[in-house]
């Protein structure tokens, strides 16, 4: 039995369905992300688990216990909000002590635990500050300390990085992940940023319009997206229109222009020969080479645009009536191409994913 | 919320333009407030002379000495402060729940309806409202009739032409101001604060007491200050609801100016009234900085 279970959970606001028929299982100690575009129901899902929103139907179990009807204060769940929700009339110390005071701990115990929490998040010496005297990153640390100090069963994070600048975001990403690992707390992380989800998560649930489209490890989600939506939402993708020619288990060849290209079927998908499908190839999986004579047939095209980006060079290739984006590491051993060059494109059979 | 609100570079001309916008207000303020109050202040240092209006060069502290050496004036000042304080507290207690409900009502139609309900009383002139209250509070008024029907009292309870009556009148006058001030502040408290408190283990009531209420302290303070200033300077309510029997400072000012024609002494009382209000503002600023972590 999973640690957290959403069972056929749905939430409507009036006629609007924010979350529809959601089933999720989250394991103990896992870093689990809800990833999806704005308005897809991530926060609503999280808030149902926290107890702020009552599901229209379904049940939520935590550790085998049905918590659906419990008020937030009875759930033992810590939440960090996008705006951090630091209590403005309290010092950092009192903020972190808040949950301990509610649990009626003695003063020395509170002091000890708050000091330890401050040390853990690297905020020792800030106990007398008020919210308005803290930077975004510091507020974040206080918000996390305030939650971790009560040692909740589950940690919920709702877009905790979105209010930070890019550099801070990169830093906090690893910092949060490290703290989560060292504490070992079951964590559910809401984000619309695929790179955050890929970097931090053990598993990801991709959501759209109130539904979960796919659940899997970052590798599965990135390399075997179940749908075109997921492929496009996560990372950059070339989705090439083609037809299935042959099918053998998960190996699947497609016809692209005049060439037959081997690929593999995305997980759980089923297609038939002759069906119109999309072939997903990530830009960094494609290699380019000038066309040589007496070569076996490959997908050939013309460089229509060259974009130099320092560490990588990107090429827009026109091939078989479609645009293909290619990203090549900027290395001296790889040929540099110019606009107008004719090139052959390569990728390994595993890198071409057939999506219905 | 401050997130994502990047400070935008503003060109100098835009900045200057912004200052131009305050010019009409400042001009109005100087012409109709600073100058009259300055004249009033100066007049209070002239010797009291019946019928004398114009400023004279003769300066004296006699009026102030008179004020502070007569117990009836000192008691009037004390009564005014007590009245304004009581009104502030009662208005706060009555207005907070209403403001809370309005602030937490998300449905825009219902929200507007509730606000109109509160503001409706402001549509009528104060005098009309007070005559309305007399019908209820008078010796043969609704409340006294009910009290006697129920056998709770033998004779009528004096609800008007006394301190109590003035309090009733001022509270009903002040409620919309308090509600409006509080609604703005309570609305500005992100709901995530209360939610954070709840998930940290606080019941709904505890979260309100420990988070929402203290976070609305800036509104409580500024609303109370506003009501205090409105109440302490009100003339019409003590005049009508107190029937001139509740001697607060504005009543004394009126008597000095309109009845005794001693403008200088009237001006002195007015200056003292003004200083009491200014002291209240100073206390408010200090409290505001301490209580709310500088939110006010
Ligand atoms: N209290 C509410 N009343 C009405 N509609 C709501 C309410 N809360 C959320 N919604 C709607 O439900 C949908 C899902 O909202 P939710 O906040 O869960 O989205 P989200 O995935 O967290 O999006 P974002 O990335 O923008 O935070 C949205 O379309 C939103 O407008
Ligand atoms: Mg959200």
Image (tube, coloured by chain):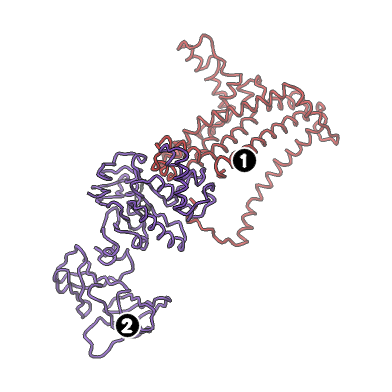
Chain colours: A purple, B red
Vertical arrangement, residue B61 with respect to residue B1, above or below: above
Numbered label attached to residue B285 = 1
In the picture of the structure, the residue carrying the numbered disc 2 is A302
Tell me the crowding category of disc 2: few under 14, some 14 to 19, or many 20 or more residues within 10 angstroms, Cα based.
many
Q: Are marks 2 and 1 in contact (CB under 8 Å)?
A: no
Quarter of the view holding residue B219: top right
Q: Position of residue B172 (x, y in %)?
A: 54, 28
The x and y percentages for residue B225 are 60, 35
Can you see residue B108? Answer: no
Where does residue B175 sit, x and y in percent of width and height?
53, 32
Q: Residue furthest right?
A: B58
Residue B286: % across, % down: 62, 40
In the image, residue A87 above or below residue B145 = below
Residue under the image location 67 percent in, 37 percent down: B278
Mark closer to the observer (2, 1): 1
Question: What is the chain identity of the residue bearing mark 1?
Answer: B
Closest to the observer, A167 or A42: A167
Mark 1, ligand 1, within 8 Å: the answer is no
Pointer 2 chain: A
Relative placement, left or right, of B206 versus B172 is left
The Cα atoms of the two marked residues, 2 and 1, are separated by 72 Å
Q: Which residue is at the far top? A: B154
Q: Are marks 2 and 1 on the same chain?
A: no
């Amino acid at each position: 039995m999973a640690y957290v279970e959403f069972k056929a959970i749905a939430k409507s606001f009036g006629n609007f369905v924010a979350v529809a028929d959601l089933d999720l299982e989250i394991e103990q100690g896992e870093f689990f992300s809800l990833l999806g575009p704005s308005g897809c129901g991530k926060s609503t899902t999280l808030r149902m688990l926290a107890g702020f929103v009552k599901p229209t139907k379904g049940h939520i179990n935590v550790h085998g216990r049905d918590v659906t009807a419990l008020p937030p204060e009875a759930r033992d769940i810590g939440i960090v909000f996008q705006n951090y929700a630091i209590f403005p009339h309290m010092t950092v110390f009192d903020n972190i002590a808040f949950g301990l005071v509610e649990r009626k701990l003695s003063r020395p115990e509170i002091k000890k635990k708050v000091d330890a929490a401050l040390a853990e998040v690297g905020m020792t010496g800030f106990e007398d500050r008020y919210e308005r005297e803290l930077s975004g990153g510091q507020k974040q640390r206080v918000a996390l300390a305030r939650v971790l100090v009560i040692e909740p069963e589950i940690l919920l994070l709702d877009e905790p990085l979105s209010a930070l600048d890019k550099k801070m975001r990169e830093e906090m990403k690893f910092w949060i992940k490290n703290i989560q690992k060292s504490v070992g707390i079951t964590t559910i992380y809401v984000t619309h940023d695929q790179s955050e989800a890929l970097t931090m998560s053990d598993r990801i649930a991709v959501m759209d319009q109130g539904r979960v489209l796919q659940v899997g490890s970052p590798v599965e989600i990135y390399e075997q997206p179940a749908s075109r939506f997921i492929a496009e939402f996560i990372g950059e993708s070339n989705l090439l229109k083609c037809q299935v020619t042959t099918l053998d288990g998960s190996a699947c060849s497609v016809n692209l222009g005049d060439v037959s290209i081997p690929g593999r079927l995305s997980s759980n998908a089923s297609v038939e020969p002759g069906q119109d499908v999309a072939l997903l190839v990530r830009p960094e999986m494609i290699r380019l080479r000038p066309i040589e004579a007496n070569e076996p047939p490959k997908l050939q095209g013309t460089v229509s645009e060259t974009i130099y980006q320092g560490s990588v060079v990107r090429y827009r290739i026109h091939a078989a009536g479609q645009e293909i984006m290619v990203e090549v590491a900027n290395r001296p051993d790889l040929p540099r191409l110019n606009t107008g060059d004719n090139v052959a494109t390569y990728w390994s059979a595993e890198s071409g994913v057939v999506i219905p | 919320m401050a997130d994502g609100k990047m400070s935008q570079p503003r060109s100098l001309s835009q900045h200057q333009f912004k200052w131009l916008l305050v010019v009409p207000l400042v001009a109005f303020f100087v012409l109709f407030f600073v100058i009259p109050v300055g004249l009033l202040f100066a007049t209070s240092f002239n010797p009291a002379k019946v019928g004398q209006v114009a400023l004279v060069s003769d300066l004296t502290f006699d009026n102030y000495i008179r004020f502070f050496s007569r117990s009836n004036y000192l008691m009037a000042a004390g009564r005014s402060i007590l009245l304004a304080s009581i009104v502030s507290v009662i208005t706060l207690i009555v207005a907070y729940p209403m403001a809370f409900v309005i602030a937490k009502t998300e449905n825009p139609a219902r929200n507007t309806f509730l606000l109109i309900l509160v503001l409706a009383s402001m549509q009528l002139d104060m005098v009309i409202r007070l005559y309305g209250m007399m019908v209820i509070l008078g010796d043969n008024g609704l409340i006294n009739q009910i009290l006697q029907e129920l056998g709770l009292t033998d004779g009528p309870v004096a609800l008007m032409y006394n301190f109590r009556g003035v309090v009733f009148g001022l509270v009903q006058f002040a409620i919309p101001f308090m509600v409006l001030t509080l609604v703005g502040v309570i609305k500005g408290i992100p709901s995530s604060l209360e939610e954070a408190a709840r998930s940290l283990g606080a019941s709904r009531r505890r979260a309100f007491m420990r988070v929402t209420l203290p976070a609305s302290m800036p509104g409580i303070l500024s609303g109370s200050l506003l009501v205090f200033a409105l109440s302490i300077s009100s003339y019409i309510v003590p005049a009508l609801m107190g029937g001139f029997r509740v001697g607060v400072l504005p009543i004394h000012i009126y008597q000095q100016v309109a009845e005794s024609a001693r403008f200088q002494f009237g001006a002195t009382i007015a200056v003292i009234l003004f200083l009491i209000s200014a002291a209240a503002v100073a206390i408010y600023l200090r409290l505001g900085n301490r209580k709310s972590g500088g939110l006010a």
